[in-house]
Image (spheres, coloured by chain):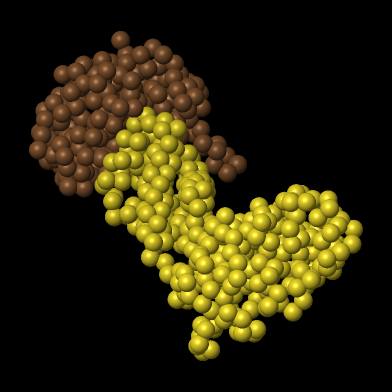
Chain colours: A brown, B yellow
Amino acid sequence: MSVLELKNIIKNYPDGENINEVLKDISFHVEKGEFAAIIGPSGAGKSTLLTIMGALLSPSSGTVLLNNQDISHFSKKQQTQLRLNEIGFIFQNSDLIPYLKISEQLQFIQKISNKKPTDAIAILKQLGLGHRLNSYPNALSGGEKQRVAIARAFINQPDLILADEPTASLDSKRGREVVQIIQETVHQQDKAAVMVTHDERVLDLVDSIWQIEDGKLKKVNK
Amino acid sequence: MYLTLRELRHDKWKFSALGLIIFLIVFLVLFITGLANGLANDSGSAIKETPAETFILQKGSQARLNRSNLSKKDWQKFQNKYHNDATKLSVAQMTIQRKNNASKKTDIAYFVINQDSFLTPKTVKKTDGNQVYVSRKLESDGYKVGDSFKDSNSGKTFKIAGFTNTESYSHSPVIYLNNQQAKNILPDSNSFNAIALKNNLTKKSGYQVISKQTLINNIPGYSAEQSSLYLMIGFLYLISLFVLAVFFYIINLQKLSDFGTLKALGTNTGYLVRHVLSEMGLLSVSGILVSFLVTYLIQLKMPASMPFSLSLTTLLGTGLLFLIIALLSALLSLIKVVKVDPINTIGGNN
C-alpha cells in the first residue's frame, strides 16, 4: 500500500502576464518501508514538489493521497496538524531551534502533539548523541545537528519522512553517514521516506530513484 | 510557555537588556507621577483634604481665594440656609520668623477658620491664647512643638501647640488660626475670602460658585506644574510604546526563520502568538515589579523638601497601563509572526 501517492499534480505560478507551470502532470508513489530519492538539476521543481508532499503548499490541480486520504485541499490549520502528526521533516540546514537543548528539540514536538510520547532520550542515544543531550545546537557539528534533525523527524512516529537535501551542508563522508542513518531508521521502523538530493554518491543507499526535469517526473531504473 | 521560558534562559543577556529598558522607563514614569502627585499635594493638600465640596467666592474673583472678599452680610445668607454645613475661610500668605532671628524667615499660609467647623483638621485641638497648630512641613525648617515664632509683618508671637499632617497651600506650610488670633494679623477681620460648603452647589446669583477641584486648579502655580508633568508622563508612555515596539520587532525579526521552522514542524500560529505575548508579558511584569521595588526604596530616602507621593492605586494602575502598552507594542511583531510562511524552510532559502 502506498503511504504517499501523487496523481496528476500540476502547480502553476503567475509570472507577470504569463503562467509559469512549475510541475507538469506529476504522478508519484512511495510505499511503506521504501526510501525514495528525487534527483534533478536546480530549478527543476524539486523543492516545490517536496512542499506539496509535505502539506506546506496546495497543488493547482491533482490529488495528494497520504494514507489514502486526499490532502490536496486541506486548510492551513489542517495542514499544520498533518505536518505535526503524520510527516517528519529533515531540512537542508537541520534548522534546529537555537534556544532549545538537544533533548528539548524532541520534547517540544512531543509537547505540542497529542500523540503518545516515545522515549526521546533513547532515540538520541541510539543516534550517538547521548553525550549531547544538554547541549545547545551551536555546540554541535554539522553531522551531529543533522542527526538531531533525523531524531526530531522520527520522534512523533510519522508515516512519512521528507528530507530536503540533507547532505547539502556536510562533507561527503558525513553526508553519507546521515543518509545511511535515514535509510536504516526507515527500514527498521517501516516508514516511507522521500529525499530530495543532487548528491548522486548516496543513491546506492535508496530503494528507488525518481528524476525531475522541467517539471516532469519519471522513475529511473536502478 | 515551554518555548518562552527556554528562550529567556538561553538569551538571558539579550532579554535582560530589554527588561532593563522596561524597568528604566516604568521607573521614570512612576518617579515623575510621584513627583506630580507630591507637588499637587504640596500645592493644595490643605484644601484637598477638607470635606468641603463647594466654595463660594466673590463675583469676579476668577476662582482665586486671594482675589475674593466677602462680608458679614454674605455670610449670614449662607449660614441661615446651610447652618453647620457652611463655614468661613480666609487664607493669607505671609512670612514668619524665629522670635529673635530676623534672618531666617519662612513663607507660610494662614488658614483662618472657625475651630468648630469642618475645615479644621482632625489633628487640631481647641486652643486659646497664642497656641496654634501648624503643618508638619514646618518641622523641616527646624520648628518643634513648644517653639515660638513671630509673624514678620505684625510682630505678633505664637506658640506651636502641635503638628497637623503635611497640609500645605501653594507650597507653603499651613498655620491654623482662629478668628481671635487672626484679628491681630489680618487688617480687616470682618471680611473674609470664601465660604466653604459641604454641599454640592453649582450656582448662586451674585457669587462665584466653584468646586473644590476648581479652587485647587487655580491655586497659583498648580495647573502649570501639573500639566507640564503630566505632559511628560504622557510622552513617556508614547515613547515607550514605540521604543518597545521597535526593540521587540527587531528581536523577533531575527527569529523569523525559527518561527518558519516551528510552523513547518507543525506548531500552530496561535501557539507562537502566545509564545511572543508571554515573552513580552513576562519581561514587562519583571521590569515593572523591579521598578515598584526601586520606587519604594527611593521613596523612603526622599528628602522632605522634595515632595513625593504615590498611592498604591496609582502604583498598580501605572503598572497595569504599562503592561498593556508593552503588549500593544508586541502587535507589530505578531503581524510578522503570523505572516511567516513555513515554505521558506524548504529549499535552503534561509
User: Seen from this angle, which residue lies furthest top?
Assistant: A1
* Vertical placement of residue B153 versus B19, above or below: below
Residue toward you, B184 or A70: B184
Residue at point 54%, 79% (across, down): B149
Name the quadrant containing residue A164.
Answer: top left
Relative to residue A68, is residue B312 drawn left or right?
right
Asked whether residue A17 appears in the rendered view, the answer is yes
Residue at point 74%, 51% (across, down): B85
Residue toward you, B60 or B24: B60
Name the quadrant containing residue A64.
Answer: top left
Residue A128, percent from left and from top: 10, 33
Residue toward you, A44 or A14: A14
User: Seen from this angle, which residue lies furthest right?
Assistant: B205
Residue B279, percent from left and from top: 38, 43
* Vertical placement of residue B194 versus A1, above or below: below
Asked whether residue B230 appears in the rendered view, the answer is no
Residue toward you, A136 or A66: A136
Relative to residue B289, is residue B121 drawn left or right?
right
Please give the count of numbered marks on the rendered protein.
0
Residue at point 50%, 88% (across, down): B101
Residue B195, percent from left and from top: 76, 61
Residue at point 52%, 67% (across, down): B161
Relative to residue B255, is residue A34 drawn left or right?
left
Name the quadrant containing residue B75.
Answer: bottom right
Q: Quadrant of the N terminus of chain B?
A: top left
* Vertical placement of residue B143 versus B330, above or below: below
Residue B247, percent from left and from top: 43, 55
